Image (tube, helix red, strand yellow):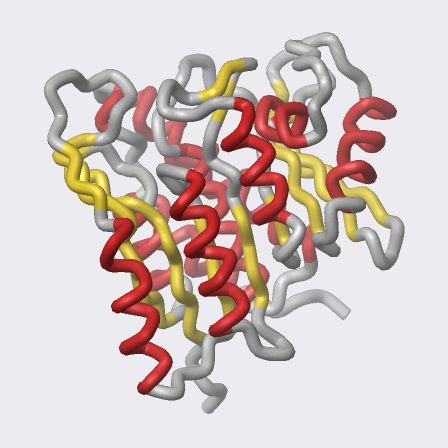
Amino acid sequence: MPRQKRVITIQDISCIGKCSLTVALPILSAAGIETSILPTAILSTHTGGFSGYTFRDLTEDVEPIAAHWKTLDIAVDAIYTGYLGSEEQLALVQRFFAEFRQQDTVILVDPAMADQGKLYPAFDTEFALGMRDLCTHANIIAPNITEATLMLEKPYPGDEYNQAYIEQLLRELAELGPRYVVLTGISFEAGKLGAAAYDRELDRFDYAFSEKVEGYYHGTGDIYSSALLAALLNNKTLAQAIQVAVDFTVGAIRRTREAATDPKFGVDFEHELGNLIKLVGQKNAD
């Protein structure tokens, strides 16, 4: 029986509105991965589409939790970060990487800070550059196009890009340090949406697409990154993992649209977990 793998994921908890830890924990757990959480904040709801939400900053708890964990002498297969709320948290997470990283530890950074050409309201360009610095310590990063261009200090292209532009963007992101770069929200033709990936060591590009579901759905980036890591830790190749994550995320979005659920509450990924388990459990072809 193989040893169960362990992930530590560092993100906030939004109690209503499925995103961050409330999607990372169940998705990774469903894929057979022991998932430990380090919450950076607790919100009554996420900040997209809700008003009057409560917010409790847990920045001061990060170091004491990490210090206790160090006494346990735990082995960590992966560390996964999502939304981080301040430059102080970026610095704390960077120290966490240094303390818990072992030779084979995978570090995945999802630089969750912007979309559709704009930073989230809490952030500025200095934060984006701080996130770029955090990405230099990762094995894998998974930005969208907005986040990628902010970190590279490039103008946002909107929908005006082609395959050559995306591949240049991937190469420049890989020059920051990570071996693998996954760029989400990519489309080269109407009705198709997906992801592009680059393996710096192999100098290889891969793409994964699915039918586009119209609308804007909160939390899908977190769902994608969680499924991506779940697939990689179940020994999928990068090309296989980006397709697993695309299919899982789009399946959840499609269920939500067909049910006419209010999208601010997040997407119905729960009913797709059975499909994820099947996808990550399939044996790789020779």
Is residue 245 visible to us here? yes
Identify whether 19 is placed above or below 191.
below
Q: Examine the image and state in which quarter residue 160 appears.
A: top right
- 198 with respect to 280 (left or right): right
x then y, percent, for residue 264: 25, 22
Residue 274 or residue 62, whichever sits in front: 62
Count of numbered marks:
0
Q: Examine the image and state in which quarter residue 82 appears.
A: top left
x then y, percent, for residue 163: 82, 24
Residue 87 or residue 186, whichever sits in front: 87
x then y, percent, for residue 64: 26, 68
Residue found 72% across the figure and 66% down from its top: 285
Q: Give the quadrant of the C terminus.
A: bottom right
- 73 with respect to 244 (left or right): left
Residue 221 or residue 112, whichever sits in front: 112
Residue found 48% across the figure and 73% down from its top: 100
Residue found 69% across the figure and 60% down from its top: 237
x then y, percent, for residue 14: 22, 39
Is residue 259 visible to us here? no
Residue found 29% across the figure and 45% down from its top: 12
Q: Examine the image and state in which quarter residue 144 appears.
A: top right
Identify whether 178 is placed above or below 131.
below
Residue 185 or residue 137, whichever sits in front: 137
- 185 with respect to 52 (left or right): right
